[in-house]
Image (cartoon, coloured by chain):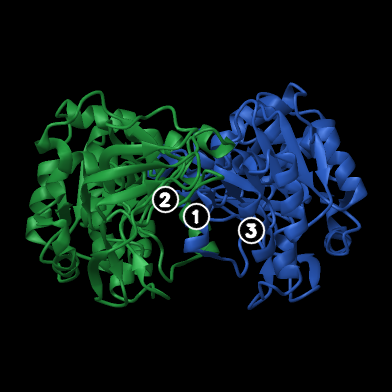
Chain colours: A green, B blue
Amino acid sequence: MRGTVLYGPGGVCFEEREDPRIVHPTDAVIRTVVTCVCGSDLWAYRGTDPVAQPTPMGHEYVGIVEEVGAEVTKVKPGQFVIGSFATSDNTCPNCLAGYQSSCVHREFMSTCQAEYVRIPNAHGTLVATDDLPAEEVLPSLVTLSDVMGTGWYAAKAAEVKPGSTAVVVGDGAVGLCGVIAAKELGAERIIAMSRHESRQKLAVEFGATDIVTERGEEGIARIKDLTNGVGADSVLECVGTAQSMRQALHATRPGGNVGFVGVPHDVAVDGQELFFSHVGLRGGPAPVRGYLPDLIDRVLTGRINPGKVFDLTLPLDQVAEGYKAMDERRAIKTLLIP
Amino acid sequence: MRGTVLYGPGGVCFEEREDPRIVHPTDAVIRTVVTCVCGSDLWAYRGTDPVAQPTPMGHEYVGIVEEVGAEVTKVKPGQFVIGSFATSDNTCPNCLAGYQSSCVHREFMSTCQAEYVRIPNAHGTLVATDDLPAEEVLPSLVTLSDVMGTGWYAAKAAEVKPGSTAVVVGDGAVGLCGVIAAKELGAERIIAMSRHESRQKLAVEFGATDIVTERGEEGIARIKDLTNGVGADSVLECVGTAQSMRQALHATRPGGNVGFVGVPHDVAVDGQELFFSHVGLRGGPAPVRGYLPDLIDRVLTGRINPGKVFDLTLPLDQVAEGYKAMDERRAIKTLLIP
């Protein structure tokens, strides 16, 4: 089969690779139906997270089960499945506490931009749909394996509640999905921080009530202006830089919450600053697995349409162009079809 | 009148000072009935937080109202009152959100180890009791102005819930009050980290079910042993050093919460470490004012007795010895009687 391998900054190849097979009795192998490129893939693509060796890429997927190991009884060959970018047995104490992405048997998916994929912990990780979904919902369904689930977690970690005010820092696919999540969780006012017209439009379509184009201190001041002078109840930090974290913390009211889902790069939070802010802070890889049944239902009933974050669709063998377009910000997110 | 002034490391004087008087119409002046020395006073006493000039000390107090400004109508001369170490108008957005210690008009109390004290924002800050309390409850009542309220906030910020497991890092007065709070909020298991026999005893008396004497990595491993291998639901960080914060974060399960109330000194939280921990973090000066009615009730009905943290009682004019005894860890906390 063929799959995507990153050789170094900018070096994306789609090449012949060994067919995945069942290694552990808890594995499954799926045939990929759609996959995509994640904003977080760009950390490696740009060399910010250097790769030490040729590295298979991709952690977002939906597919058809080809084969399952002896201990996988919840899904069977022929079923259409969606799973999380972080695998989980769904039985350990962390899974039971709703933090499947801290499963004691967790393995992060990393080979999904390929024709076939081995899924570890398949029993706990994969959720099958009743029927084969219609083609038009595939983009939305594949977002549930990461970006939409991550936006959802950002809103949950930021404790978005009905009637509250939420700010979304970051206008990438995760931030845009965060707008959807904030709306679904009942936020009355949703302020998206964005400078890009196409993203602003999508944010408004997803439920944003206000757009703030300013950044840094000016952005913080603007949020304060819009929130009674004290800051927002909930802030979704969907970037992962020191600047975006600072912006998030200072845009939150005392007693409010920041949910941070951009993997932090060179971020250190000053203890005394956090202390006097009275802001609650929770982040991490989203426990997508726990949200899947609910989010699949919201997609299949047409309540949410996160697939709109894809503004570029390519055949999987043109994956390199998919990375390039996102790197150059010509695309928000690239959908890949094998 | 006479009051306490710190001149530099170790330099505590009790000396003649100007009588406090009403400056703003929102002020009151009280005659101090009891006051005390706080663990946080030792940061300045030890020179960790250097004082630039002779500095009045003390932020814990109960007293009798002597005089009120024109806008203070909720308390009147002759009443026995308790207030927070952080004053608040109790009407601003942050007060209404339950974060009175982030009141937009907040002033931190700092002159309370004295015979008389001016209380800014008296209308919102002071709570009067119906009657003059009996002498034996005065130690417990004065803890409500800071340490007991702070322990309570640590437990609330750490989201202690009925049936949960809580860990308390720090065996000072705040940590010990944190044990009381965790018990009152329904924690089933309360693990106190302490190496000092007298403090261990008091922790157990207050409701601790386990004592862990190990610190650092060994302490973290011990907590994991006691908590299903994953860590505690709630950890109360009551010290404020980089070591204690690290200990707290690593002793918490994914999805659990750290409430931190020790003013952080040289603490930086690594963004990526916090991210992958899945731990929620909230700290700050405790919004004591909001807790006062409830906590006063718990003290006056004999449900809690946080006054036991005082193991040294001195006349106010011997305040210097009160600092010394705490600095040398001969005393947990010193009560001062004018």
Cα–Cα gap, marks 2 and 3: 22 Å
Question: Taking A112 as reference, is A42 above or below it?
Answer: below
The x and y percentages for residue B109 are: 60, 55
In the rendered structure, are the residues bearing label 2 and label 1 in contact, judged by CB atoms less than 8 Å apart?
Answer: yes
Q: Which mark is residue A285?
A: 2
What's the residue at 28%, 74% (across, down)? A46
Residue B276 image label: 1
The residues bearing labels 3 and 1 have C-alpha atoms spaced at a distance of 16 Å
The furthest residue to the top: B301
Q: Is residue A206 left or right of residue B33?
A: left
Could you tell me which secondary element the residue under label 2 belongs to?
loop
Give me the C-alpha separation between circle 2 and circle 1: 7 Å
* Three-letter amino acid code at the position of disc 1: Phe
The residue tagged with tag 3: helix, strand or loop?
A: helix
Instruction: Give the chain letter at badge 1.
Output: B
Percent from the top left, x then y, of residue B206?
80, 34
The N terminus of chain B lies in which quarter of the figure? bottom right
Closer to viewer: mark 3 or mark 1:
1
Disc number placed over residue B245 in the picture, else none: 3
Q: Residues within 10 Å of mark 3 (few under 14, many from 20)?
A: many
- The three-letter code of the residue at mark 2 reads Pro
Of residues A48 and B174, which is closer to you in this image?
Answer: A48
- Disc 2, disc 3: CB below 8 Å? no
Q: Nearer the viewer, mark 2 or mark 3?
A: 2
In terms of sequence position, does the residue under pointer 3 or pointer 1 come before the other? 3
Image x and y of residue B118, in percent: 60, 52
Along the viewing direction, whichever of B195 and B277 lies nearer the viewer:
B277
